[in-house]
Image: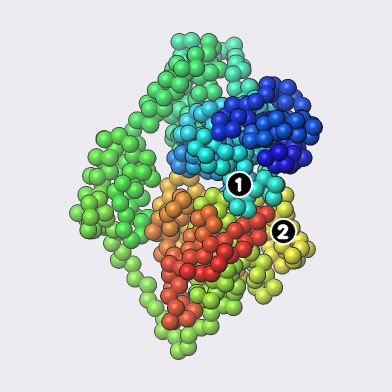
């Protein structure tokens, strides 16, 4: 354990010894929030306590901020605030949680447990400590780095601005500027002001945790400020009032149903349209019943399961000869199982940080010598993209000359090259997931001899990306990525008619955010 502690110190982290199997510390560590220990200190401590766990003091001293996640719900909430292309170190805790590591560039960023509005999510920043691998938890299990995402192997990125905006800071408790006329957030009108802000944010469809965090900061800055406990109660009350305001449920539900493809569940409509109250759900059921009576949708087998009746007709032109598939290459040799033809769409759905961008960059690298490629990225800036591409043997100049790199986060179909390879990384959406199917169709309709490879975000341990079954409609190849595993969910064009590729899986590791290595063979 001593050698690992020294390695952490050499990486620039403030290291302290912790009681084995506990989150208590063997020294007073206040001084080490301001200065680093020496190697001599480390050797002395671990000679005295050879089984001591390793703690890293977070905050500016170590240039380190750690998001501590203890629930699946909290993980999904916090992922909404991260760019899907972002790669960062991840450690797994003995009790099944995760620690996500970022750079701490702000002396005002605070340690807080929990982060308001998030389920089981804490932040360790200035004034905090985090236990790191290979330390041992109270249950005897070790903290472990996720394979390929070790803190010693990949750069630690700064906290994305969207996440940083909702994290607790010292400046959050500063009073609001006052005005000589019509003051807001003052005694006598604080509650109504909070409600009106909440209503505006709900109408803007901001995620609830973000609304909650914004309102809590305002409540703490009122004149006079609400006490912390009362502030939380006021925020919950204002948010509930805002969420209960009238909506055009009929129009929302009708539009949602018309955008579905295949089967859908009533519960999915409740969830995606954030219908929470009994009254909203009753109105939704009434709209569903009306659409069913009019022959637009029909009830399928099972309670609460429906499908949109598709009366559209697309005539098929018969061809004398079958066209040849495109000679494209995929990571892990996917081309040995599935063919891609001109005009096809392929979907890559993956959980955050699981390797979608790495797979797309490798796909681009394998095909840039033969095809024209346009790569649309919704989140990578020049620094991050360049850092990743430096991990390939081809070198940056080759990528500059052979691939067109474009920053784009909406309306991707407007700049599709009909006869080229188009890569969309990724279709970013945080609400109204039913729209994704329509977006994919717009891309499909722009293609002629070219193809499109589209990345989607998905929830862990589900096959399909946001938007559900509708995202499979136009896809001739549909890949799903979870941490360390790639699955062929759908392959319409079998390369070998005797070998069914659907459902095949392969395990892999990812290094430096781009290097993909298979573990074993396809199964």
- Label 2 or label 1, whichever lies nearer to me, is 1
Tell me if residue 330 comes above or below residue 252 in the rendering.
below
Would residue 312 be found to the left or right of residue 220 on screen? left
Which residue was labeled with disc 2? 391
Which residue: 59% across, 58% down?
509
Q: Is residue 486 visible?
A: yes
Q: Nearer the viewer, residue 36 or 167?
A: 36
Name the colour scheme. Answer: rainbow
Would residue 310 be found to the left or right of residue 471 on screen? left
To which quarter of the image does residue 390 belong? bottom right
Which residue: 46% across, 50% down?
459
Tell me if residue 400 comes above or below residue 383 in the rendering.
below
Which residue: 67% across, 24% down?
27
Residue 391 x/y as whole percent: 72, 59
Q: Is residue 213 visible?
A: no
Which residue: 47% across, 81% down?
496
Q: For the residues marked 2 and 1, what is the alpha-carbon distance in whole angstroms? A: 21 Å
Q: Nearer the viewer, residue 104 or 218?
A: 104
CB under 8 Å between callouts 2 and 1?
no
Q: Nearer the viewer, residue 6 or 385?
A: 6
Q: Quadrant of the N terminus?
A: top right
To which quarter of the image does residue 261 belong? bottom left
Residue 292 x/y as whole percent: 22, 54
Tell which circle, 2 or 1, labels the residue nearer the N-terminal end. 1
Q: Residues within 10 Å of mark 2 (few under 14, many from 20)?
A: some
Residue 145's disc is: 1
Tell me if residue 175 comes above or below residue 357 in the rendering.
above
To which quarter of the image does residue 282 belong? top left
Would residue 43 be found to the left or right of residue 244 on screen? right
Would residue 19 be found to the left or right of residue 475 on screen? right
Residue 58 x/y as whole percent: 66, 31
Residue 213 x/y as whole percent: 51, 28
């Amino acid at each position: 354990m001593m050698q690992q502690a020294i390695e952490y110190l050499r990486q620039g982290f403030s290291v302290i010894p912790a009681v084995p199997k506990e989150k208590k510390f063997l020294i007073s560590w206040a001084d080490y929030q301001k200065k680093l220990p020496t190697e001599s200190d480390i050797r002395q401590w671990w000679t005295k306590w050879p089984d001591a766990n390793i703690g890293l003091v977070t905050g500016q001293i170590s240039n380190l901020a750690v998001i501590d996640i203890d629930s699946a719900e909290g993980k999904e909430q916090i992922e909404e605030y991260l760019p899907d292309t972002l790669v960062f170190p991840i450690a797994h805790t003995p009790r099944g949680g995760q620690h996500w590591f970022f750079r701490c560039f702000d002396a005002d960023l605070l340690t807080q447990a929990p982060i308001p509005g998030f389920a089981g999510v804490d932040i360790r920043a200035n004034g905090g400590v985090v236990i790191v691998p290979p330390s041992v938890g109270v249950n005897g299990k070790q903290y472990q780095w996720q394979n390929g995402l070790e803190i010693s192997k990949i750069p630690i990125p700064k906290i994305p601005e969207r996440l940083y905006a909702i994290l607790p800071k010292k400046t959050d408790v500063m009073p609001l500027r006052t005005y000589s006329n019509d003051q807001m957030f003052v005694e006598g009108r604080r509650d109504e002001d909070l409600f009106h802000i909440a209503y505006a944010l709900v109408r803007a469809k901001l995620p609830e945790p973000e609304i909650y965090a914004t309102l809590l900061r305002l409540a703490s800055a009122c004149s006079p400020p609400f006490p912390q406990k009362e502030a939380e109660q006021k925020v919950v009350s204002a948010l509930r009032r805002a969420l209960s305001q009238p909506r055009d449920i009929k129009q929302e539900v009708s539009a949602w149903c018309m955008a579905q493809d295949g089967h859908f569940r009533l519960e999915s409509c409740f969830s995606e349209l954030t219908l929470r109250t009994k009254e909203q759900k009753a109105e939704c059921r009434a709209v569903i019943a009306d659409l069913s009576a009019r022959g637009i949708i029909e009830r399928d087998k099972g309670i609460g399961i429906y499908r949109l009746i598709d009366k559209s007709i697309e005539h098929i032109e018969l061809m004398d000869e079958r066209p040849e598939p495109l000679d494209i290459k995929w990571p892990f040799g996917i081309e040995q199982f599935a063919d891609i033809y001109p005009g096809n769409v392929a979907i890559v759905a993956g959980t955050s940080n699981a390797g979608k961008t790495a797979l797309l960059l490798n796909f681009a690298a394998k095909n840039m010598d033969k095809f024209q490629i346009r790569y649309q990225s919704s989140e990578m800036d020049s620094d991050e993209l360049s850092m990743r591409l430096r991990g390939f043997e081809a070198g940056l100049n080759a990528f500059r000359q052979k691939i067109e790199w474009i920053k784009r986060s909406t309306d991707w179909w407007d700049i599709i090259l009909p006869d080229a390879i188009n890569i969309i990384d990724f279709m970013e959406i945080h609400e109204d997931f039913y729209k994704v199917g329509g977006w994919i169709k717009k891309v499909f309709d722009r293609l002629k001899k070219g193809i499109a490879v589209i990345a989607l975000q998905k929830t862990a341990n589900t096959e399909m990306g946001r938007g559900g079954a509708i995202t499979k409609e136009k896809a001739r190849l549909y890949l799903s990525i979870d941490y360390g595993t790639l699955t062929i969910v759908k392959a319409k064009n079998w390369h070998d008619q005797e070998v069914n590729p659907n459902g095949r899986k392969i395990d892999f590791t990812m290094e430096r955010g781009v290097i993909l290595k298979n573990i074993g063979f396809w199964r």
